[in-house]
Image (cartoon, rainbow, N blue to C red):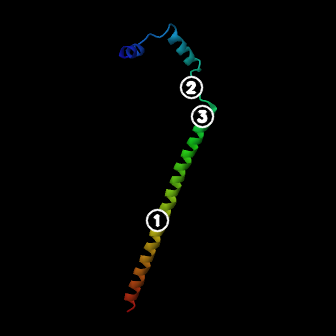
Amino acid sequence: MDDELKAALRRKEPPDGFTERVLAELRGGQARLSVPPRRRWRAVAAAALLLAIVGGGEAVRIVRAKQQMLAALHITGAKLRGARNHIHEISTR
């Protein structure tokens, strides 16, 4: 079995004209990978879904950050009002 495997994997010279045919196809612009239309649509759909997930996740993160900032400002405002009222009470005594 080892001998068969070695024989199958042995380096072989390409057939005559192989290099010229490959270069001719490359020059002619015909060397493209053909992707069936169904796979193209799947790839486009997958890319759109990924973009929506990433974009949606970013939007959620921004909304949460905004909510946290507003909560922090609300707490800060309440603390400042409390400090102002305390100072006002002390100064009016």
Please tell me which residue is depicted at 57% across the width and 24% down the height of the picture.
32
Name the residue tied to disc 3: 39
Q: Is residue 15 above or below residue 32?
A: above
Between 76 and 59, the one lying in front of the other is 59
Name the kind of residue labelled 3 in the image: Arg
Please tell me which residue is depicted at 44% across the width and 10% down the height of the picture.
13
Contact between marks 3 and 2 (CB within 8 A): the answer is: no
In the rendered image, residue 62, in percent from the top left (x then y), is placed at 50, 58
Q: Secondary structure at mark 1?
A: helix
Between 26 and 86, the one lying in front of the other is 26
If you read the primary sequence from the N terminus, does the residue marked by circle 3 or circle 1 appear first? 3
| Cα gap from disc 3 to disc 1, whole angstroms | 43 Å
Name the residue tied to disc 1: 68
Name the kind of residue labelled 2 in the image: Leu
In the rendered image, residue 59, in percent from the top left (x then y), is placed at 53, 55
Residue extending farthest to the bottom is 93
Between 59 and 70, the one lying in front of the other is 59
* Closer mark to the observer between disc 3 and disc 2: 3
Contact between marks 3 and 1 (CB within 8 A): the answer is: no
Name the residue tied to disc 2: 33
If you read the primary sequence from the N terminus, does the residue marked by circle 1 or circle 2 appear first? 2
If you read the primary sequence from the N terminus, does the residue marked by circle 3 or circle 2 appear first? 2
Q: Quadrant of residue 37?
A: top right
